């Protein structure tokens, strides 16, 4: 068993049930919504990169299509689950 270092400080002591309560369960729906939001940010950045000539037109089109397909699939999954986006 490892000994705590001299600099170790216990900041909080929790019972096992308190630890479980501290952890916030993220639902599958929340994960899908978060990923869709991330993709929307990536699409905005991609548009900006293209406008400032950081990427070529071919690269832009390829990445944009891929991101949109992924986003559409995630939105379809939410729709199948009865979630309106």
Image (cartoon, rainbow, N blue to C red):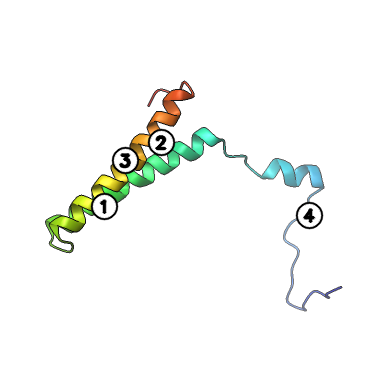
Near-viewer residue (66 or 51)? 66
* Residue at mark 3: 69
Crowdedness near tag 1: few (<14), some (14–19) or many (≥20) residues, C-alpha within 10 Å: some
- Under circle 2, the secondary element is helix
- Give the left or right position of residue 20, taking residue 48 as reference: right
Near-viewer residue (5 or 83)? 83
Tell me where residue 18 appears, x and y as whole percent. 76, 44
Q: Where is residue 28, by image quadrant?
A: top right
* Residue at mark 2: 74
Q: Earlier in the sequence, mark 3 or mark 4?
A: 4
Q: Earlier in the sequence, mark 4 or mark 2?
A: 4
Task: Please say if 20 is above or below 63.
Answer: above
* Residue at mark 1: 63
Query: Which residue is pictured at 37% across the width and 41% down the height?
Result: 37
How far apart marks 4 and 2 lie (CA) works out to 40 Å
Tell me where residue 21 appears, x and y as whole percent. 71, 40
| Residues at discs 3 and 1 in contact (Cβ within 8 Å) | no
Q: Quadrant of the N terminus?
A: bottom right
State the mark number for residue 13.
Answer: 4
Query: Which residue is pictured at 72% across the width and 60% down the height?
Result: 11
Q: Earlier in the sequence, mark 1 or mark 2?
A: 1
How far apart marks 3 and 4 lie (CA) works out to 46 Å
Query: Which residue is pictured at 74% across the width and 56% down the height?
Result: 12
């Amino acid at each position: 068993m490892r000994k705590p270092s001299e600099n170790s400080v216990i900041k909080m002591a929790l019972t096992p049930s308190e630890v479980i309560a501290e952890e916030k369960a993220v639902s599958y729906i929340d994960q899908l919504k978060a990923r869709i939001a991330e993709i929307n940010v990536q699409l905005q950045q991609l548009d900006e990169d293209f406008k400032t000539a950081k990427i070529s037109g071919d690269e832009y089109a390829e990445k944009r299509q891929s991101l949109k397909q992924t986003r559409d699939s995630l939105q379809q999954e939410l729709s199948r689950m009865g979630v309106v986006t």
